Structures are given as structure tokens and as C-alpha cells.
Image (tube, rainbow, N blue to C red):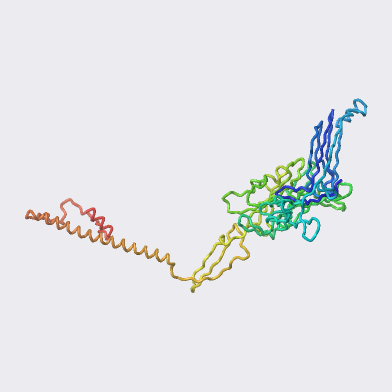
Amino acid sequence: QVGGFRGREGFVSGKPMEVGRIFFTFELSCASDCEFVFMEASAKKGVTVLQRWTGAQPRQYYTYLVTRNDSYTFSWSFQKVSWEKSYLKSGSLRMFETDMAKVYNINVTNTIDGGASSCLPCPQAPAAAGCIPCPAGHYIENNTTECTRCPSNTVVTDPLPYGRQSCLPCGPGLTAPDHLTCIVECRLTVDNRTYDLTNISNARAMMGSTLFTSSGTKFFHMFNISLCGNTSVTCANNVSYNMEGEVPTVISRVCRSTIVPGMEGMTGSGRNGAVATQSVTLGDHLVGVTTNTTLMDITVIEEFQQPNNSLKHDLHFFYTTPLSTRACPKGRSTTVTLSCNPDEPGEGKVTLPHQCPDGTCDGCNFHFLWSSALGCPECSKDDLIVVHGECEGGKQKVHYIAPKNCRAPDAIPGGHSVPCSTRLPFLVEVIVLSTVSMALMLCLLLFCLWKKNQRLEYKYMKLVASASSKDGMIELPPAESCALDDGEEEDVQFTQAPPRGILSKLKHSKIA
């Protein structure tokens, strides 16, 4: 029997901290089938089989780490498995007399009522004799035995924290203000974005899908979730199967109870009521809060993952229960995805995956999607959309609008007036002036080209006239008659007016 341990229990980076250790050396000598069982009993969990060995075993050393600070009773049991069959065959009670289990030594460390096998130097006060404990969040320097403060966001769980390695870092998004426990603040900053979860910090309960037993009895699972702060959730059974009548209660960050509605007489009140049973923890410890979809071998279900090009900034809460079971040798884990959804005001709603309607597909990993407008990050100054009003009387109103992928902060600037002017900005004036100048220069160039073309046309006509007058006689064209001959019909011809534009005249002059 062990009354308790000196260490303080806790979780760091998803792993339970050691409060004590029990180790022993044993050997099994069996001519037939035999079984050696190592068990643990406590008031909270009852009797638990920690390890079992069958058949002959050579001399070996076994160590068990204790992570829960409680009073325990450790026991060992040796049994010849084939005794019943041997009695029926031979009727003798002296079969396999040489089969035995040998336990050479048993050691338990860090107990509250035990001694020490060795001594270490400790911090001492100048005016007091004996050792003094270091304050919380400090470790003992190996060389000077002085108490030194640990870095921020680290915890110290070792009762004798020698060396800086005793300062254990918290997971992403977590803080340790007291250097004792890693927690997530309800107002936190992740990836340079600030989230305010104060209004959804209370415990949230949700009902899973309705299920039926083979006999047709309806039941469902009730989940309780706590996101931030020091808030814990409780799942309690109102039906007890132990002899003392003690109602088992589970206190953790995420837990689940099986609810059977409408069971008459099962609640002890004589009335119809819901039966709550099989309460289990799904997350004793919050290991991290991040926008990444994977943390410590825990992955968010693909249905709740956003594409890489999404403008949404979902937060993922990763919980773990490292204590293993036969079905879940690595323990249970839970992910809660807090999704920014402006269409879900207030606390929003919690949903389960479509492919796993009861929250889990394998019984060990659970997934929840919490959609709420309060899950959106606060808009930074660069995120706000600036809208300028008209300039009236030398004043212009400026308004700030928050986009949909973030939440307007409480200190968002209101509409205010700024001085303005109807005069165009200097850069715009320069651009307009340059454009007008280039247009005038182009028009002047076209006019010069047209004028030059007129002069060339005049010189060409004079050259033709002078070339024709060299023969001394200029042939005149015959006179044209306007009269119609016999059999001719009058034709109407339409002539097109000569082009008046400068470009058209230039074109016709070039053709000519």
C-alpha cells in the first residue's frame, strides 16, 4: 500500500508527468501454462490490471510510471491456468509443484511516507538552517544550487527541479502564468491574429446522433466541451453499479456520457427519466491551439479542413487523454475546429462529421466543428476597408468597414471628417497636363504635314503645266455635249463630296 506521492500530477506537451515509479524484478518458472498479473487499485478507478505475463519468463526488470497522485494498493497474482483441467484428469491437488513466481525486489520512489536512497545539494537561506523550496516557476542550478526563474510559457512539475531541463515548454497557443499549468487564455494571439473567445468560454453541451440497441432501445451520446480558460466540464452517471453506491464522475476538458431516455425506475426516483451512464473522458489535457491541422500525431478530419487558398482563419484545439485502453492503446484524442462563420451569431452551433455521425470513426479520435461569428479573428488596421465620402464644404467623411473574414474590434474608428479640397491631386494634374500637351503637339504636327503636302501638290501642278507648254501648243480637250443622242437614256450619277478631314486629305493626296 502506498499512501501517496510527493510529485504533482500534470500534462506537458500531451504527455502525463511522472509523480512516482514502482519497479520490481521477477522470474516465472512454469512447466505448464501459468499467468502472472500485476494490478493497481485506487479509490477513483478501482482495480486495474497493469500488465500480465504467461508461460515461463526469464529473470527480468519491470518499471511502471505513476502519473496520478492518489493512494494505491499494488498487488501481484500468480495462477496456474490449467489447474481445473488437471483436477478433472488426475484428481490430484499436487500437480506442477515446481511452478512458481519469484519476486526478487520491489521499489517505490517518491512516496510521501518513504525515505531517500541518496542526497542532493539544495538551496539554503542565509538566515535559516536547512533546505528551502524554490518558488513556483524556478529551477535549481546544478553548480550554484540557486533558484533561477524559468523562461515564460514553461511549467515545472518536478518536486526537485535540478537544471534548466526541468522547465518544460507549453504547446502552441498556450501560456503558463503561474508556471504550474499550461492553459489557453480566452483572449489569445495565434499567427499574429487576435481572437476573443470570452463570450464562448462557458462549457458547451451537444447531443450526438440517435442510436438504437439490438433490442430497439434508443440512446445517444452527450458531449461536453470546454474551449478556454480554467473551465472544466463534468460528466456524471446517475446509475451506479458498485457496492458502495458511489456515483462515478469524470472531470476533464472534453467528456462524453451515454444517455438512455425514458427508463422508468432506473433513476431511483420512481419516475420516468433519462439514465446517464458510461461517462468517459475524451480530453484530459489541451496540448495546443493552432491554425495547423496536425499536432503531435493528431490530425483534424479532412471534412473540417479549409483549403490552402481560403481566407478563413480557423482555430484547431487539440485535446488528448494519454491513458491507454485495450481498444485505444495510444489513448484518446479530440479536435475542436473553431470556424469563423458570420452567419452564426452568438455562441453558434457545434456539428459532427457527416461520415462519422457520432463524432468518431474509430472510437479513439473524436472531431467537432464549432461555427460561430465569435470565432472570427479581430480585424487589424490593415484589414479594415476605408470608404471616403464626397467632399462638401472642404470636409470629407471617412468610414471603416470590417470584411467578412474578421470581426470588427470594439475600438474600431468611427466615422469622422477630414479636410478635403475639390482641386485635383498634384499627380492627377501632372498627368492631365501632359496628356493635353501631347495632344496639342500631335495636332500641330498633323497641321504641318498637311501644309507641306499642299505645297508639294502646288509644285507638282506647276511642273506638269510647264512640261506641257514646251511643245508650243497646248491641246485642249474636246468640248463635251450635254445633249442626249437617239436611243440613250439619262443616267443619274451621284458624286461623293471630297473629304474635309486633314487625315483624309493627306490620304487622297498620297494616292494622287
**Going by the picture, which residue comes out furthest to the bottom?**
393
- Work out whether residue 204 can be spotted: no
Residue at 68% across / 51% down in the picture?
171
Q: Please tell me which residue lies in front, 6 or 64.
A: 6
Residue 321 is situated, as x and y percent measured from the top left of the image, at 74, 47
Residue 48 found in image quarter: top right
Does residue 452 appear to the left or right of 145 in the view shown?
left
Which residue is situated farthest in the left direction here? 472
Q: In the picture shown, does residue 389 fall above or below 339?
A: below
Q: How many marks?
A: 0
On the image, the x and y values in percent for residue 371 come to: 66, 54
Q: Is residue 415 visible?
A: yes
241 vs 493, nearest the viewer: 241
Question: In the image, is 420 to the left or to the right of 148?
Answer: left
**Picture quarter with the C terminus:** bottom left
Q: Toward the viewer: 230 or 143?
A: 143
286 sits left or right of 436 in the view: right
In which image quadrant can residue 398 be found?
bottom right
Residue at image point 51% right, 68% down: 389
Residue 216 picture location, percent across and down: 79, 43
* Horizontal and vertical percent position of residue 46: 84, 45
- Furthest residue to the top? 90
Q: Quadrant of the N terminus?
A: top right
Which quadrant of the structure image shows residue 435?
A: bottom left
